[in-house]
Amino acid sequence: MSSTNAEPELEREQHLVIDTTPIMNESIRDGAEEADDEAGTVRTGSSQIREGTIASGRFNILSTMVGGGSLSLPLAFQKTGNGFLAPVLLLIVACMTEFCFRTLTTSARTLSPPDHNRRGQDSYESIASAAFGRKAYVMSTVLVTAMCFFGTVAYAVLLRDMLQPISEYVFERSTSGPTWENNVTMLTVVVLVTPLCTLKTLTALQRFGALGMFSVLVLGSCIVYRSIECTAHHADDWKAAFQWGPNSWRDVLDVFPLFVSCYVCHYNIPVVHNELHNPTTARVAWWLKSTTWTATLFYMLMGVAGSAYAPCAASKELHGNVLLDFDNDDPVVMVGRMCLALTITLAFPMLTIPARDIVIRTLCSARTISAPTTELLLEEEIDFEEPLLADHDNEEGEVAEADDNQKQHSLGLLLFASIGVFWIAALLASCVSSIDIVWELLGSSLSIFMSYLIPCGSYLVIIRMRQVFQTEISWKDRMSVMFAWFLVLLFIPLMFLSSANAVYKVFLR
């Protein structure tokens, strides 16, 4: 085939991937609706209205991002130098994270410009699929599911540790680790929070997100108070709590995954963006910026204050969970423990719902072979006032009966997926002895791959598609492309190096 004939063919293929004219927008949406009808998706009802505010979006992302991972930051700050290098590293990671958030929303808006009156249909997996094809869709689906699932496992382990004083009080026995007493207490909380994991959208959780953030602030305040008290008692040697840099660069490599893990929430960015009311570029930018730097401010406080407590720690070296360095009967820290337990409990739905929706989409798509759509089947689409699979050719009586059957089917599927994902993770957590193992392996491999490589790689491909239809590209887009390439080239070798180091630490050292 000649190059002249190949160019129109390439252009036609790109028209199928990216929306560049109203005609293509309509064509792609019609195709997506047709695929959804085959999969049994209902697109009517109030569930299609954008109801999310910037505040609700911020709380939802912060609830996913801020939590148990922040307890490892004092160790990361101590190892890398809490007087200079650690804060600099945190700021650098924050800048890179905000940029990757923007690449996800930019990619989504490029593929399907948002309708300000109708909920969006983008997902982390659909963006990867649009850039790299069906295999990328499958791979990103597996990655998101794994990240959410093992994140739930890690949080359940941490929750069990935080509830240990309650277990000792109830069972009148002092135990630690995955004992049956501690596991019973943890699983009781899991059962109580399960109804929240059956909600259809993340916006419905905005009040719980605000409560979770308040609890985290109380926890941070408790740690800051004890840290200031420690510094006051060691006034003659307070400089010993601060150092400019690491003792060895191996320490930096050891704890770098802890910095990365604190910002992992990328799979929820497109979901919350779908629900954001009036998603103008300025509003989206402010939502992402305020979310990232609110978390960074809290992380900086936790890292500096927590690491400054090292002189008062029994071994002068901090644990991966800084709360373990305080006395179990410390009343101030006990308040912080209970606040963290509340925060973790309220974060479970943020981790379970994305994984649950992927499971449901997989179960539904197993009935038909179709291209991956940009929808979250239950989180955004299913309206229980409508049948999951409507047959418009039936008579009214038959349709009414089918409506009742389909409502029961869709509700049963939602409950089955929610309980299955959440409870299996909790049961697995009951066998895990330490949260450090989970953070080490997730932060060194999956977190880097999902947080930086997939968003930047997808952005580069999608922007290149857009350039085919535009004669001029703004200087901001050019700078973004250059920075995306920089992150890809930086994190590919860093991911392999960090993963090898984590495997060595966990299994061989």
Image (tube, rainbow, N blue to C red):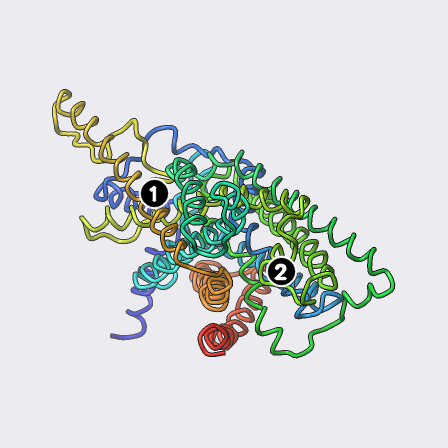
**From where the camera sits, is residue 468 visible?**
no
- Image quadrant in which the N terminus is located: bottom left
Task: Describe residue 349's horizontal placement relative to residue 312 as left or right.
Answer: left
Q: Quadrant of residue 417?
A: top left
Give the crowd class for mark 2: few <14, some 14-19, many >=20 residues within 10 Å.
many
Task: Describe residue 222's horizontal placement relative to residue 17 as left or right.
Answer: right
Which amino acid type corresponds to the residue marked 2 in the rendered image?
A: Leu
Residue 272 rendering spot, x and y as whole percentages: 48, 43
Which amino acid type corresponds to the residue marked 1 in the rendered image?
A: Ser
Residue 457 rendering spot, x and y as whole percentages: 46, 65
Residue 402 rendering spot, x and y as whole percentages: 17, 28
Task: Describe residue 426's horizontal placement relative to residue 72 as left or right.
Answer: left
Residue at the right extreme of this rendering: 236
Viewer-closest of 91 and 277:
91
Give the crowd class for mark 1: few <14, some 14-19, many >=20 residues within 10 Å.
many
Q: Which mark is residue 73?
A: 2
- The residue at 30%/49% (across/down) is 359
Residue 44 rendering spot, x and y as whole percentages: 32, 31
Q: Which mark is residue 418?
A: 1
Task: Describe residue 417's horizontal placement relative to residue 480 as left or right.
Answer: left
Q: Between disc 2 and disc 1, whose residue precedes?
A: 2
Q: Is residue 244 above or below residue 413?
A: below
- The residue at 36%/64% (across/down) is 132
